[in-house]
């Protein structure tokens, strides 16, 4: 529920504390090489897989997972479609109050900063990667220089295989207890990640409108899940993500299954402001999105965009692969203390890999 001014406040107070800027060594480093397959101090470990059976009634779908992982984490209301029943089911099994489950489910509207990348190689093959950075707002652990929430989210990170008729419909990387989606793909068809967009006309305006009964706009994590569940092509997904009213500003990073199908959709709550697409014929073989509009400078204390682009340029289109994508996402400050996990997606090959991350000192807080 933070607007841009609150972000600025948080980052400035952190900066005053640390008295450093992100672009000075040792907070940056040369583009990493040969970090894949993941190992060493920036790799915390693998992420377990669970199945969510869409043939079960919504109330029961999450029981197996939540019995395994009763999470550490109020808004009540009429959530759309299956979401409310699913959340009630999770609350009953874990004993956590429903209000807590719901606020956890809208945490996107609170605070995430992320990096998402789509690339196209010389053969027209697409790849999609993302770092999920979350938790700046809620406290710093001075004993080992980590963000409290970031650390608590790591053991809750799960890969989910949503199945119907015993067949995969879509897969996501998420946190146990969160029924929306911020990172996912539909094998063979498209991949989709969400990055938060800070704006003075921010998420809280939409949430207040929603509480006061104006329920025509969609929760961000829920619209992504609906698109993954029910859309059957890149074009259909793009159309919905461009046109549907949403509760908070956002960047949707969408990849398809053939050359040229990759874009960043910059969203206001009511409309799309910009759709920036791959254009391999003109040499635009990647799109990179962090948390700033592409036509504006990144906030000077938080420029992960320039380092990511510099490393992609250095990699070259000839050599882009899941392995070199992981290198880019492992280079500070694209990798930082907020990074919970890295996901790599190959839509046409059906690959979806998620890795828990650490950023040992010296490493910037964001
Ligand atoms: C830091 O300390 C917290 C609290 O003791 C712990 O949960 C977390 O795993 C630690 N993180 C690292 C990277 O050592
Ligand atoms: C689901 O498919 C797996 C193989 O993919 C099979 O072993 C299992 O028996 C199937 N389950 C049901 C309920 O059909
Ligand atoms: C997907 O579509 C079906 C059929 O219209 C609907 O019942 C279901 O709620 C939708 N799923 C989501 C997540 O919106
Ligand atoms: C790519 O997606 C389209 C739908 O947009 C689908 O019809 C086509 O079969 C997909 N191609 C492959 C190779 O899966
Ligand atoms: C990356 O390469 C493009 C195309 O040559 C160039 O316009 C851009 O400035 C480069 N960016 C960085 C950060 O090196
Ligand atoms: C691309 O990869 C090849 C083979 O690993 C390597 O020889 C070459 O130097 C790489 N090119 C760049 C620009 O890194």
Image (tube, helix red, strand yellow):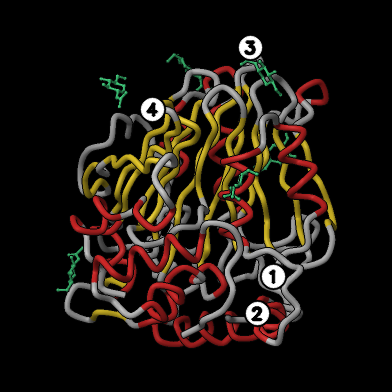
**Which corner quadrant holds the C terminus?**
bottom left
Label 2: few (<14), some (14–19) or many (≥20) C-alpha neighbours in 10 Å:
many
Q: Are marks 4 and 1 in contact (CB under 8 Å)?
A: no
On residue 166, the disc is 4
**Tag on residue 247?**
1
On the image, the x and y values in percent for residue 62 come to 33, 54
Alpha carbons under labels 4 and 2: distance apart: 36 Å
Cα gap from disc 2 to disc 1, whole angstroms: 6 Å
User: CB atoms at circles 2 and 1 under 8 Å apart?
Assistant: yes
Let me know if residue 142 appears in the view: yes
Q: Decide: marks 4, 2 in contact (CB < 8 A)?
A: no
* Side (left or right) of 124 relative to 327: right
Q: Residues within 10 Å of mark 3 (few under 14, many from 20)?
A: few
Question: Of callouts 4 and 2, which one flags the residue occurring earlier in the amino acid sequence?
Answer: 4
Circle nearer the viewer, 3 or 1: 1
Residue drawn at (33%, 80%), measured in percent from left and top?
97
Mark 4 sits near ligand 2, with its Cβ under 8 Å away? yes
> Depth check: 237 or 277 in front?
237
The answer to whether 194 appears left or right of 328 in the picture is: right
Under 8 Å from ligand 3: the CB of mark 2? no
CA separation in Å, label 2 and label 3: 44 Å
Q: Which residue is mark 2?
A: 207
* Disc marking residue 123: 3
CA–CA distance between discs 4 and 3?
Answer: 33 Å
Q: Residue at x 48, y 88 (%)?
A: 13
Q: CA distance from mark 4 to mark 1?
A: 33 Å
User: How far across and down, in percent of the image, does residue 96 sit?
Assistant: 28, 76
Regarding mark 4 in the picture, which secondary structure is present there? loop
Mark 4, mark 2: which one is toward the viewer? Answer: 4
């Amino acid at each position: 529920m933070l607007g841009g001014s609150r972000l600025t406040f948080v980052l400035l107070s952190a900066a005053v504390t640390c008295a450093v800027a992100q672009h000075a060594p040792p907070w940056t480093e040369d583009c990493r090489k040969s970090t894949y397959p993941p190992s060493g101090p920036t790799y915390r470990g693998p992420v377990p897989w669970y199945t969510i059976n869409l043939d079960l009634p919504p109330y029961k779908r999450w029981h197996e997972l939540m019995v395994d992982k009763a999470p550490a984490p109020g808004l009540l209301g009429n959530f759309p479609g299956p979401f409310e029943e699913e959340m009630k089911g999770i609350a009953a099994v874990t004993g956590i109050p429903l209000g807590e489950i719901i606020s956890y489910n809208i945490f996107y509207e609170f605070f995430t900063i992320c990096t998402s990348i789509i690339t196209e190689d010389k053969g027209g093959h697409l790849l999609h990667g993302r770092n999920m950075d979350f938790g700046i707002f809620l406290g710093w652990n001075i004993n080992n220089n980590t963000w409290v929430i970031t650390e608590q989210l790591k053991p809750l990170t799960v890969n989910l295989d949503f199945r119907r008729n015993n067949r995969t419909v879509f897969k996501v990387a998420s946190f146990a207890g969160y029924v929306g989606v911020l990172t996912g793909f539909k094998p063979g068809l498209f991949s989709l990640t969400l990055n938060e967009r800070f704006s003075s006309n921010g998420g809280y305006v939409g949430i207040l409108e929603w509480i006061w009964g104006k329920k025509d706009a969609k929760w961000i994590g829920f619209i992504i899940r609906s698109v993954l569940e029910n859309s059957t092509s890149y074009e259909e997904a793009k159309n919905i993500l461009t046109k549907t009213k949403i509760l908070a500003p956002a960047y949707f990073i969408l990849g398809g299954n053939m050359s040229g199908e990759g874009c960043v959709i910059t969203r206001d709550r009511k409309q799309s402001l910009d759709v920036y697409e791959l254009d391999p014929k003109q040499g635009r073989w990647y799109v990179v999105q962090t948390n700033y509009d592409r036509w504006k400078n990144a906030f000077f204390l938080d420029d992960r965009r320039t380092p990511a682009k510099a490393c992609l340029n250095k990699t070259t289109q000839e050599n882009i692969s899941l392995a070199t994508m992981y290198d880019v996402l492992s280079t500070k400050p694209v990798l930082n203390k907020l990074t919970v996990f890295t996901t790599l997606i190959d839509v046409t090959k059906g690959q979806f890999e998620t890795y828990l991350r650490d950023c040992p000192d010296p490493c910037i807080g964001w």
